[in-house]
Each structure stands twice: as C-alpha cells, then as structure tokens.
C-alpha cells in the first residue's frame, strides 16, 4: 500500500473523510466532506505529521524551515518537523506567526526560527479552499526576510474550480509562483474507493459526477 492509500484510510478511520451528502460553504452539494478538526489525539497528530513528512520527502521539496500559519497550521508544522527528524533524519527549523504582533518580551510577529534572506521555507496547512492562508502568509514571510518559499503542503487537493475556471491550487501557483503539494488529491480518493482501499462504493458514481461538474485537471 502506498503512503497515499494509507493516508486515505487514516482519514476515514479518524472521521476526517466522510461520504454522504453535504452542503459546502460554496453552496455546492458534495458527496464527501473533509473535517480536519476531527484529528484529536496525540497519536493521530503524530501520524498526521508522518504523512506530511512523507509528502515533503517524496517530492524532494527543498526545506530549511517549516512555517505553520496560526492557528491550525501550528500543530501541523510541529508534528511534521518532528516526523522529518524521526523518520527521515532531516532536522529542520519551524516557526509560526501570531495573529497580532507582540509588543513585550521578545516581541515580534513570529515564534520559533528567525527568518533570514534566501531561507528555504515550506508552508504547512490542512486543506486549501480559496488560498486565503497562503495569501495572508506570503506578505508576512516576505516582510520578515526575503525568504524562498519552495512550496506549500496540504492534506487534500479537492481539484475543484473556485470562482473562476481554475482551482485554488492553480490560482496561487499563477499568482505567487508557489507549488502546492497535496498528500492526496480527489482523484486519489476516487481511486481508493474504486480499488476497495476504503469503503464507499455506493458513492463512487456521485464522486465521479461531482468531479465532472466542478473539477479541474
């Protein structure tokens, strides 16, 4: 079993990936839903970090520092930096931002590694719906130093059109030149159902229809 297939199983086991009929924020009726808030235990978070680390390692993404956007990205960056060290012997830094700059103590906008020019930074987040996390993170990172953002890692690429004809992943690549690396894509999930990696065959036709109506290549 590939790490992608294992991750899809993991999402289902954690109740993060569910199938049924869901009304999304966009108003679309989707046959599946992803709720990353259902990762709740230390064991789950440790395993999740391993999958992020697998994605970074498999794609050979150059990295010196992992950045987790507040708030959801903070535990993701921490678990991933630990997994990179434990599983692959890759010791990198991490940092995260504050919602508001601190004006006492050490002060500043960031906690963790102090960023420097040309530092290779990878942003860690859960799912990308509109690209908001990246759009908010880029000016903060560039305001701290002229860093080299070598990629962004997310759990799932829904491969779905936003307001235009492109997906959020495609839009941020075009706007910022940043490649987004998903651990899995919607097509991976469809294949996992088709190949009995996870249950849900009764939703396969609806998944394919949804992909046909809203998907991008």
Image: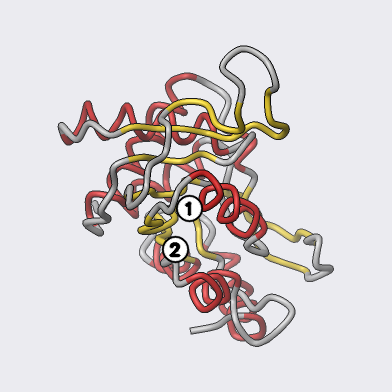
Q: Is residue 29 above or below residue 83?
A: below
Q: Position of residue 203 (x, y in %)?
A: 60, 66
In the picture as drawn, the residue positioned furthest to the right comes out as 27
Q: Is 107 situated above or below 206?
A: above
Circle number at residue 118 = none
**The one of 173 and 103 positioned closer to us in this rendering:** 103
Labels 2 and 1 touching (C-beta < 8 A):
yes
Q: How many marks?
A: 2
Q: Residue at x 46, y 32 (%)?
A: 95
Report which quarter residue 128 is drawn in. bottom right
Secondary element under disc 2, as helix, strand or loop, is: strand
Which labelled disc corresponds to residue 180? Answer: 2
Mark 1, Cα crowd under 10 Å, few <14 / some 14-19 / many 20+, is: many
Residue 147 in the image: state x and y as whole percent.
Answer: 40, 52
Q: Which residue is mark 1?
A: 154
Q: Nearer the viewer, residue 197 or 214?
A: 214
Percent across and percent down for residue 78 are 43, 28
> What residue is drawn where x is 65% and y is 87%?
165
- Residue occupying the point 45% across, 35% down: 77
Residue that appears at 51% across and 79% down: 174
Q: In the rendering, at what x and y percent does residue 167 appear?
A: 59, 76
- Image height check: is 155 above or below 23? above
Residue sticking out furthest to the top = 105
């Amino acid at each position: 079993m590939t790490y992608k297939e294992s991750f899809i199983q993991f999402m289902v086991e954690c109740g993060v990936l569910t199938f049924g009929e869901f009304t999304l924020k966009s108003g679309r009726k989707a046959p599946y839903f992803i709720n990353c808030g259902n990762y709740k235990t230390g064991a789950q978070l440790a395993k999740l970090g391993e999958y992020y680390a697998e994605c970074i390692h498999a794609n050979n993404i150059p990295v010196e520092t992992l950045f987790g956007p507040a708030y959801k990205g903070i535990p993701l960056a921490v678990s991933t930096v630990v997994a990179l060290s434990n599983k692959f012997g890759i010791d990198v830094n991490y940092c995260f931002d504050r919602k508001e700059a601190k004006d006492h103590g050490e002060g500043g906008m960031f906690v963790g590694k102090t960023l420097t020019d040309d530092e290779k930074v990878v942003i860690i987040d859960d799912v990308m719906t509109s690209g908001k996390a990246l759009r908010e993170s880029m000016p903060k990172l560039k305001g701290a130093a002229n860093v080299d953002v070598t990629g962004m890692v997310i759990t799932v690429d829904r491969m779905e059109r936003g307001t235009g004809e492109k997906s959020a992943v495609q839009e941020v690549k075009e706007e910022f030149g940043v490649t987004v690396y998903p651990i899995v894509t919607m097509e991976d999930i469809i294949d996992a159902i088709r190949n009995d990696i996870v249950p849900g065959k009764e939703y396969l036709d609806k998944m394919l229809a949804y992909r046909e109506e809203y998907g991008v290549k």
